[in-house]
Image (tube, rainbow, N blue to C red):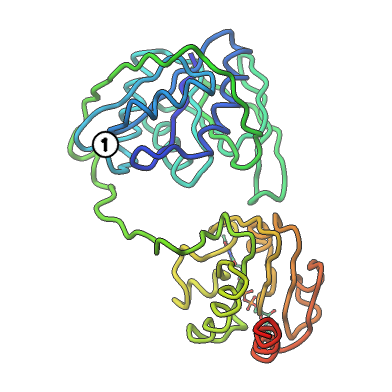
């Protein structure tokens, strides 16, 4: 079997899990085995049923009081125990921050190799892989060895496809988990504002960098985004300086965006920022430096001080 770790948030299925299942089905078919979904924590019967549309006929639910909130070492131990009980050919998860962290723990605990952010797999004694490296700026050909192949699937690469099964047989697995496996765990949550448009899904994003000058300077960007029904994000400089929360960071170590239009204000366009915004259909850069990388790569560029350009733009839109 191929174990596919399903990422869900308190029962809400994550779309990246469906991308992972699409590639897992191909790997399973090439291996001549089936895909078994692994779900961690309390789940609804509906969630397991929903997986039937994506080729899953068997699901294992790891059930334990401590597993409802994310705890990487404990979750990894549960997956390791499920693997030891079932002998899968491979374990696949999403290439999200969480999926990659979790599988790194599984790899460490089982003493196996793991490949992150895979886009293609050719099965064999070792797996021949293509995977995304350097924040999406290059593809690498790699070989993955090991009795059980551990890999995560690069987000936003697989086209999700359905392959209905006749239903999902759900099996409950109770792992044995030592208290020390819960040293790192989620203890509380801060919910985003309900009406806030998420950066990852926004059709329009206004981004600010060091050129914005201060946390207060973002009022202009918030106003522009409000007029255009978009979201506001920023560079890492901005989140490091505490002008915006980390959740607003765009880039390699932040959120990848793919809006119709990205308005980048006072952002130089360093490679680590670029990999997070290059999915935008059009980019408008506003910068005092015509040689800034963001200006040379953008579809449209305004050479000027954003503190003058943005009020003029806002005034025009308000008309
Ligand atoms: C491992 C690693 C991961 C990283 N991950 C990320 C990441 O996820 N996201 C990210 O953004 N960065 C990331 N970085 C940091 C990245 O390398 C850059 O340092 C950062 O993106 C620069 O931010 P910036 O463009 O705001 O600042 P700067 O590079 O300082 O650029 C400021 C720009 O503002 C312009 N400007 C100044 N004043 C004005 C004005 N009044 N009007 C208009 N323009 C003005 C300047 O001409 C300049 O181009 C990472 C770095 C490393 C090493």
Please tell me whether residue 289 is drawn above or below residue 9 in the rendered image: below
Q: Residue furthest bottom?
A: 308
* Residue 194, image quadrant: bottom left
Quadrant for the C terminus, please.
bottom right
* Residue 163, image quadrant: top right
Q: Residue at x 75, y 58 (%)?
A: 281
The answer as to whether callout 1 falls within 8 Å of ligand 1 is no
Q: How many marks?
A: 1
174 to the left or right of 314: left
Q: Nearer the viewer, residue 126 or 83?
A: 83
Please tell me whether residue 22 is drawn above or below residue 73 in the rendered image: above
In this figure, which residue is indicated by the disc labeled 1?
A: 67
Residue 270: percent from left, percent from top: 68, 67
Q: Residue at x 56, y 55 (%)?
A: 200
Please tell me whether residue 116 is drawn above or below residue 33 in the rendered image: below
Residue 256: percent from left, percent from top: 60, 55
Q: Quadrant of ligand 1?
A: bottom right
18 to the left or right of 78: right
3 to the left or right of 287: left
Residue 204: percent from left, percent from top: 64, 64
Q: Residue at x 53, y 65 (%)?
A: 249
Say what secondary structure mark 1 lies in: helix
Q: Nearer the viewer, residue 204 or 96?
A: 204
Residue 153: percent from left, percent from top: 57, 35
**Label 1 neighbour load within 10 Å: few <14, some 14-19, many 20+:** many
Please tell me whether residue 39 is drawn above or below residue 13 in the rendered image: above
């Amino acid at each position: 079997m191929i174990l596919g770790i399903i990422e869900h948030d308190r029962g809400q299925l994550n779309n990246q899990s469906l991308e992972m299942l699409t590639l897992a089905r191909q790997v399973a078919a090439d291996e001549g085995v089936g895909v078994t979904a692994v779900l961690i924590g309390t789940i609804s019967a509906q969630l397991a049923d929903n997986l039937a549309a994506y080729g899953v006929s068997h699901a294992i639910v790891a059930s334990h009081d401590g597993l409802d909130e994310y705890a990487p070492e404990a979750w990894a131990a549960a997956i390791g125990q499920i693997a030891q009980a079932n002998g899968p050919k491979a374990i696949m998860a999403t290439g999200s921050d969480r999926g990659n962290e979790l599988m790194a723990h599984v790899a460490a605990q089982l003493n196996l190799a793991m490949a992150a952010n895979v886009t293609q797999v050719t099965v064999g004694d070792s797996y021949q892989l293509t995977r995304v490296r350097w924040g999406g700026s290059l593809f690498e050909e790699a070989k993955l060895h090991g009795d059980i192949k551990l890999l995560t699937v690069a987000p936003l690469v697989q086209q999700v496809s359905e392959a209905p099964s006749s239903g999902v047989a759900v099996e409950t697995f109770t792992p044995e988990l030592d208290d020390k496996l819960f040293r790192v765990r989620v203890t509380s949550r801060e919910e985003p504002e309900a009406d806030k448009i998420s950066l990852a899904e926004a059709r329009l994003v206004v981004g600010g960098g060091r050129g914005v000058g201060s946390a207060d300077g973002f009022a202009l960007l918030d106003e522009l985004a409000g007029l255009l029904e978009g979201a506001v994000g920023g560079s890492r400089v901005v989140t490091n300086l505490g002008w915006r929360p980390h959740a607003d960071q765009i880039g390699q170590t932040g959120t990848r965006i793919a809006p119709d239009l990205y308005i980048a204000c006072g952002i130089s366009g360093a490679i680590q920022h670029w990999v997070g915004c290059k999915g935008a259909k059009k980019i408008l850069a506003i910068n005092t430096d015509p040689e800034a990388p963001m200006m040379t790569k953008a579809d449209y560029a305004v050479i000027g001080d954003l503190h003058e350009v943005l009020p003029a733009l806002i005034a025009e839109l308000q008309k």
